[in-house]
Each structure stands twice: as C-alpha cells, then as structure tokens.
Image (cartoon, rainbow, N blue to C red):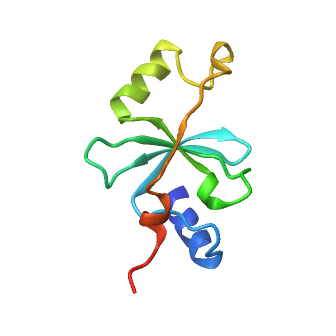
C-alpha cells in the first residue's frame, strides 16, 4: 500500500517523484523509510530521508544488498543504532536516472 501511495504522491508532485520498483520495508519515523530497490539484482536497501532540501538529496544507499541490511539489523550494527551516530551513507546516484521519464 505504501509503495502505491508514494508513487501516486510522486505523480502529483513531480519535484518529489518516487522511483519505480523501490519498495518501502521499514518506517523509521519522521517520514523516513528503508526501501528495497527491486529493480537491481542485488536488491540494495536505500534510505529515503525527505527532510532534505530537494529530492535528489533525499536518497542514500543504506546497504548494498537486502541480505547485508538484514544482517546489520540483527547484529545491531546499522546507522540507526545509538552507537553508530557517525556512520555516513553514500548518496543514491541512480535516483535521477530512475525517476526521469524517457522522452
């Protein structure tokens, strides 16, 4: 349901498009989501952090695969753990490619 709502919201607000195939799997609060990129074979987990100034700055690579993300969750080593406040995530550079329609 959340995926469909996000896609619809992105159609209504083209400045904040939601990429096709990016499935929210965990809500972190403050409108932040962990999402799986279902179009990539390794299924990377992305962080959507909409408190950024622009949609280009709202997406980060949380883990290179769903398997590694689940492992860090179980082990308590993810960025969301209090002891990991200093973890930096790389921006998701495919965002604009994945949300720009072919003309």
Closer to the camera in the image, 17 or 90 = 90
Q: Is residue 43 left or right of residue 35?
A: left
Closer to the camera in the image, 53 or 44 = 53
Residue 65 shows in the view: yes
Q: Is residue 57 left or right of residue 18?
A: right
Q: Residue at x 63, y 60 (%)?
A: 55
From what the image shows, is residue 12 above or below residue 89?
below
Give the total of numbered labels. 0
- Placement of the C terminus among the 4 image quadrants: bottom left
Which percent across, then down, holds residue 12?
63, 78
Residue 1 shows in the view: no
Q: Residue at x 74, y 50 (%)?
A: 51
Which percent across, then down, holds residue 33?
59, 44
Which quadrant of the figure has residue 29?
A: top right
Which percent across, then down, holds residue 77?
52, 16
From what the image shows, is residue 49 above or below residue 68?
below
Which quadrant of the figure has residue 71?
A: top left
From what the image shows, is residue 70 above or below residue 26?
above
Q: Residue at x 38, y 41 (%)?
A: 44
């Amino acid at each position: 349901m959340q995926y469909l709502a996000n896609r619809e919201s992105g159609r209504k607000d083209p400045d904040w498009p939601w990429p096709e195939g990016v499935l929210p799997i965990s809500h972190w609060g403050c409108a932040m989501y962990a999402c799986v990129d279902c179009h990539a074979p390794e299924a990377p987990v992305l962080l959507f952090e909409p408190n950024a100034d622009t949609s280009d700055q709202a997406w980060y690579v949380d883990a290179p695969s769903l398997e590694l993300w689940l492992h860090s969750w179980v082990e308590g080593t993810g960025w969301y753990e209090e002891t990991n406040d200093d973890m930096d995530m790389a921006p998701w550079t495919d965002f604009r490619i994945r949300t720009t329609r072919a003309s």
